[in-house]
Image: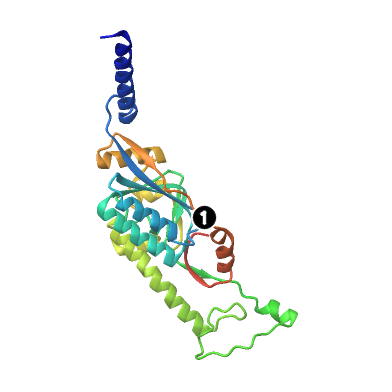
Amino acid sequence: MKKTHIIIVIAVVIAIITGLAIGFGMRGFAIRGDVGVVEIEGMILTSKYTVRDLKMFADDPSIKAVILRVDSPGGIVAASQEIYDQVAKTAESKKVVVSMASVAASGAYYISLPADVICANPGTITGSISVIMDYPVFEELLDKIGIDFEVIKSREHKDIGAPYRHLTDEEKELMQDVIMDVYDHFVDATADARDLPRDSVLKFADGRIFTGRQAKDIGLIDTLASFEQAVDITGELVGIEEPFLVYPPKRMSFIDLFIKPAERLLMPRLQFLWH
């Protein structure tokens, strides 16, 4: 064999070995696989992107598991419920692990419930199992500056929650019933997911927050772990020694950043939110 041919063969062999080293990891021939990471940061105002990313990973055969990285005080009830439903659907076909960052309270805790494993840092703020509705009322201000509203409505409660007047006592009772209906669902979901008696959940489902360590003691989470440790836990669940993390593309429009949040400031809204 000519010298040039020998050099070419050696170069090919080196390239193959290098490729195998990269593909299987530098710690020998470790098993690698893809793990999708969906990040939820800030208030939960919409489910659009989170649901889309979860669906994408659930439908991708190359993704072996999904990590939900949560750093949020919660947010809008309906959006949280839609994310919760998609997390539950994803967990039917893929292992789902929640990794709580600084805060994963109220609605952010709620969306974590369907996961196979919930991890938190010892100092993570979580819990706040509760529901709140709030909105500004400008009645006194409008009176001072001489602005009034003419309201024509089909029935007496059509403008319930309008910012130009306070609620009547009857309306407060109606709104309280709405709040309690959503609250009962939150409590039931927690009791079912965490395998806890409902009465036990009710003892601490009064809006209070917990550290990650406290949450573990009462059964709200499974284990204390950093994000890196949560990655290792995920790998163990699916038999991957070196999980390769895959993140969805970030897409955010001007409307999502500025217009929609401004609109919601004046809207009465049910919220799973820790204040």
- Counting from the top left corner in percent of width and height, residue 68 is at 38, 49
**Of residues 82 and 22, the one drawn nearer to the viewer in this rendering:** 22
- The color scheme shown is rainbow
Quick check: 162 above or below 250?
below
- Residue 194 relative to residue 213: left or right: left
* Label 1, residues with CA under 10 Å away: few <14, some 14-19, many ≥20: few
Q: Residue at x 46, y 76 (%)?
A: 176
Return the x and y of residue 105 as percentages of the image width and height. 45, 56
Callout 1: SS: loop
Res 85 → quadrant:
bottom left
Q: Residue 128, can we see it? A: no
| Residue that extends furthest to the right in the rendered view of this protein | 145
Q: Residue furthest front?
A: 2
Would residue 145 be visible to someone looking at this image? yes
Q: Quadrant of the N terminus?
A: top left
**Residue sitting nearer the eye, 97 or 169:** 97
Residue 231 image position (x, y, % from top left) = 36, 40
Horizontally, residue 150 falls left or right of residue 14, namely: right
**Looking at the image, which is closer to me, 20 or 122?**
20
Which residue is rendered at x = 74% and y = 83% of the image? 146
Q: Which residue occupies 31% across, 64% down?
A: 198
- Give the answer, above or below, for where 243 lies relative to 179: above
**Residue of label 1:** 252
- Number of callouts in the render? 1
Q: Nearer the viewer, residue 168 or 165?
A: 165
Q: Position of residue 108 (x, y in %)?
A: 43, 56
Residue beneath the point at 49% across and 59% down: 274
Residue 37 vertical position relative to residue 205 in the rendered view, above or below? above
Q: Amino acid at mark 1?
A: Met
